[in-house]
Image (cartoon, rainbow, N blue to C red):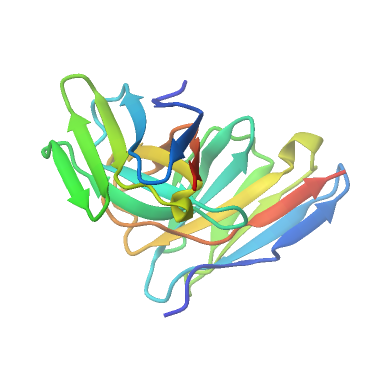
C-alpha cells in the first residue's frame, strides 16, 4: 500500500513568486491536512480538507490556500512568497480526519525562498 | 498560544537506559494524545497514542503515562537503543464541528549513546 506522496521534494523560489505543492493521500483516505514545520515554530497546522471541502483552518495569512480534488489529492498554494515561508511543508492523510484516526504523513516538500 | 508544552528540548541517554519526555496541555477538550517520531528527512510517524480515559498504554518498549487531573502525559522508552535516536513530538487533538487538527509540542531531540 503506497504511502502519502508529496511533490516536489525540494523547491527554491524567489520572494514574491507563488508556489503550488501537491499531495497524494493513501488510497481510500478522504481527509488531507497540511502542516508547516520550521525550527522556530515547530509543526503548525495550516488547513484540513475532507471531500473537497475545507473543514478547518489554522492561523495563517490568506496567502496560504489549498484545495482538494474529487480523487482526494490536494494542492497547497502560497502566493507572494516571503523569506519566512521557507519551511518543510507536510501533508497528512487519514480515513476520516476525526480525532483518534491515525494520520499518516508524507516526507514533505522543502521550500526555500531566496 | 502554545497549547501543548513539551520538555526537554533535547535529551541524551545511554544505550539501555530509560528515555522520558514530558508534555502538558491546557485545553481540556483534547481527547486524543498521540506521540510522533521523526527521523531526518522524513515526515513524522505515529508511535503510540492514548485517550484520556486510560492512565497508561504500553506498546513494546514504549509507554505513555497519562495524568488527566494534572493535564500531563509522558513518553517512556525502555531499554533505549541507538535506532531510537530521533525527534519526538507529543501532540493533542479534539473532535469538534466534524473536524479536527493536531496540535504539536515543540519536539524533543533524543540521542542514544552506544
Residue at horizontal 24 percent and vertical 56 percent from the top:
B60
**Residue B59, image x and y in percent?**
22, 54
Identify which residue, B87 or A71, lies in the foreground.
B87
Quadrant of the rendered image containing residue B94: top left
Closer to the camera, B86 or B72? B86
- A96 w.r.t. B109: above or below: below
Residue that protrudes farthest toward the front in the picture: B114
User: What residue lies at 84% left-to-right and 51% top-to-bottom?
Assistant: A13
In the figure, residue A74 lies in which quadrant?
bottom right
Q: Is residue B59 above or below residue A58?
A: below
Task: Return the x and y of residue B71 as percentages of the image width and height.
Answer: 24, 23
Image location of residue B67, percent across then percent down: 18, 27
- Residue A93 position within the rendered picture, expressed as x and y whole percent measured from the top left: 43, 61
Depth check: give the residue in front, A67 or A89.
A89
| Residue B21 in view | yes
Residue A99 in view here:
no
In front here: B22 or B103?
B22
Question: Hey, which quadrant is residue B28 in on the image?
Answer: top left
Q: How many numbered marks have been drawn onto this rendered protein structure?
A: 0
Vertical relation: A61 (above or below) A50: above
In the image, residue A72 sits, relative to residue B102, either above or below, namely below
State the residue at coordinates (29%, 52%).
A98
Residue B76 shown left or right of residue B43 in the figure: left
Task: Write the residue at 15% across / 40% down.
Answer: B56
Amino acid at each position: 500500500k503506497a504511502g502519502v506522496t508529496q511533490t516536489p521534494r525540494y523547491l527554491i523560489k524567489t520572494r514574491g513568486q507563488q508556489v503550488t505543492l501537491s499531495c497524494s493521500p493513501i488510497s481510500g483516505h478522504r481527509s488531507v491536512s497540511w502542516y508547516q514545520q520550521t525550527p522556530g515554530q515547530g509543526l503548525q497546522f495550516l488547513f484540513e480538507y475532507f471531500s473537497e471541502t475545507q473543514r478547518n483552518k489554522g492561523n495563517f495569512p490568506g496567502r496560504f490556500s489549498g484545495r482538494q480534488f474529487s480523487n482526494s489529492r490536494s494542492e497547497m498554494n502560497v502566493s507572494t512568497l516571503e523569506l519566512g515561508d521557507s519551511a518543510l511543508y507536510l501533508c497528512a492523510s487519514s480515513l476520516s480526519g476525526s480525532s483518534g484516526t491515525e494520520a499518516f504523513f508524507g516526507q514533505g516538500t522543502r521550500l526555500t525562498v531566496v | 498560544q502554545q497549547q501543548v508544552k513539551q520538555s526537554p528540548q533535547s535529551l541524551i541517554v545511554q544505550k539501555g537506559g530509560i528515555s522520558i519526555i514530558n508534555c502538558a496541555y491546557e485545553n481540556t477538550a483534547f481527547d486524543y494524545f498521540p506521540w510522533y517520531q521523526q527521523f531526518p528527512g522524513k515526515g513524522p510517524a505515529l508511535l503510540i497514542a492514548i485517550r484520556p480515559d486510560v492512565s497508561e498504554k504500553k506498546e513494546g518498549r514504549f509507554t505513555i503515562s497519562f495524568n488527566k487531573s494534572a493535564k500531563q502525559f509522558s513518553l517512556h522508552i525502555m531499554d533505549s537503543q541507538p535506532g531510537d535516536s530521533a525527534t519526538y513530538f507529543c501532540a493533542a487533538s479534539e473532535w469538534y464541528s466534524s473536524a479536527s487538527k493536531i496540535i504539536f509540542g515543540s519536539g524533543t531531540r533524543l540521542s542514544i549513546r552506544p
